[in-house]
Amino acid sequence: MKVAIIGGGIVGSTCAYYLSKENLDVTLFDYGVGQATKASAGIISPWFSKRRNKAWYKMARLGADFYLKLVADLQKDGYNTNFYKQVGVYLLKKDDSKLEELFDIASERRKESSMIGDLKILSLEEAKQKINSFNNNGRILFASGGGRLEGERLVTTLINASKVKVVHEKVSLEKENDFYIVDGQKFDKVVLAVGAWLPEILKPLGYEVDVRPQKGQLRDYKIKDENSGQYPVIMPEGELDIIPFENGVVSVGATHENEMGYDLAVDKKQLDEFGKEAQHFLENLKEAEIINERVGIRAYTSDFSPFYGKIQDEKNIFVASGLGSSGLTTGCIIGYNLAMMLLNKETTLDETQYPVEKYVTKINK
């Protein structure tokens, strides 16, 4: 069987990795320009979410758990998994009296997800024992199971581990009888993991897609504390996240810009504002050096829900999109489930809860 995977981000690279364990001819088309995953760093800690979408929470919860399997599989294959680490998370609220409610929510959810680990409400003095330059106006909710993830390291590791053929160019999709044509080659099955570009690639086949772009910007700093790799990640209220990595690298972001289309220009003003806000919580950022700025385009749907599976009128096209800002939490498990669907093996999610037909419709039936 010849399989084309278009899109080498978190979904496509995970799918490629698990398909590569089977006797298949897999080609990954990874154009990469504007890719959300490579421009991202994130926090794997979905357990405090108050979103009412139960299907989304189940995916996010199982997606966080899935990292334990992914890391174990890659380590078994001999690969470094430093893209991910459970360092704990500091959850902050402007009104810290709300922390008790979140503590109760997470305590209940820990019954089905032990990965949350220890839960504690800490004073500022207790929190500073883990990050001596930490500051906050109130108490902090700590969960030891929270993790941090570096997106580019993740996809690079997965693609290297998959050992599939990789083509670094932008391609289109055509149909010829029961085959699909990508880059002049015939394929039996196609996985479309192109995120916000799904409408563009499906339009020639007569499909309309409820997916739009969301611009996200992130800035990396270098602080003087070489112990930053042991810091918990910091989640203030709002869009700002502070994600420490080893060797003094700290990522600050990311923006959520819904009206910028596919614009990849760095907006230093917005990043300066995020950086200034972050300094309140991590004071050694005031003396930090800016070492990198990244821009990527997320995909989101009109109801902010992800979807994945087979296109209803195409028995051999599998798609995923709409992951939004939780893509680092849900992307790997979606990619794994797409691989299992393609192989007709047991899946860990119920794809009917994330229906493709709700977002991908045939224009000319």
Image (tube, grey):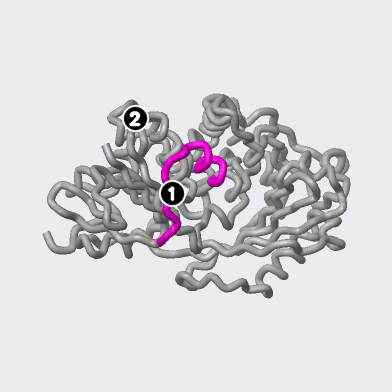
Q: Nearer the viewer, residue 168 or 111?
A: 168
Query: Could you say where residue 232 lies in the image, as x and y percent from the top left?
Result: 74, 41
Instruction: From this view, report whether residue 194 is shown above or below residue 77.
Output: below
Residue 203 seen by the camera: yes
Count the marks.
Answer: 2
Q: Quadrant of the C terminus?
A: bottom left
Q: Are marks 1 and 2 in contact (CB under 8 Å)?
A: no
Label 1 vs 2, first from the N-terminus: 2
Q: Is 311 displayed left or right of 212 in the figure?
A: left
Residue in the picture at 76% in, 58% down: 221
State which quadrant residue 109 falls in.
top right
Report which residue position mark 2 lands on: 23
Residue type, label 1: Val
Magenta stretch encompasses residue 165:
yes
Q: Residues within 10 Å of mark 2 (few under 14, many from 20)?
A: few
Residue 93 seen by the camera: no
Q: Nearer the viewer, residue 103 or 349?
A: 349
Residue in the picture at 68% in, 43% down: 99
Q: Nearer the viewer, residue 300 or 204?
A: 204
Secondary structure under tag 1 reads: strand
Query: Could you say where residue 128 lies in the image, as x and y percent from the top left?
Result: 86, 43
State which quadrant residue 278 falls in.
bottom right
Residue in the picture at 48% in, 54% down: 324
Q: Is 119 displayed left or right of 49 in the figure?
A: right
Query: Could you say where residue 158 lies in the image, as x and y percent from the top left?
Result: 52, 40
Magenta stretch encompasses residue 247:
no
Whole-number angstrom distance, CA of label 1 to CA of label 2: 17 Å
The residue segment tinted magenta is 155-169
Report which residue position mark 1 lands on: 166
State which quadrant residue 228 falls in.
top right
Residue in the picture at 69% in, 28% down: 118
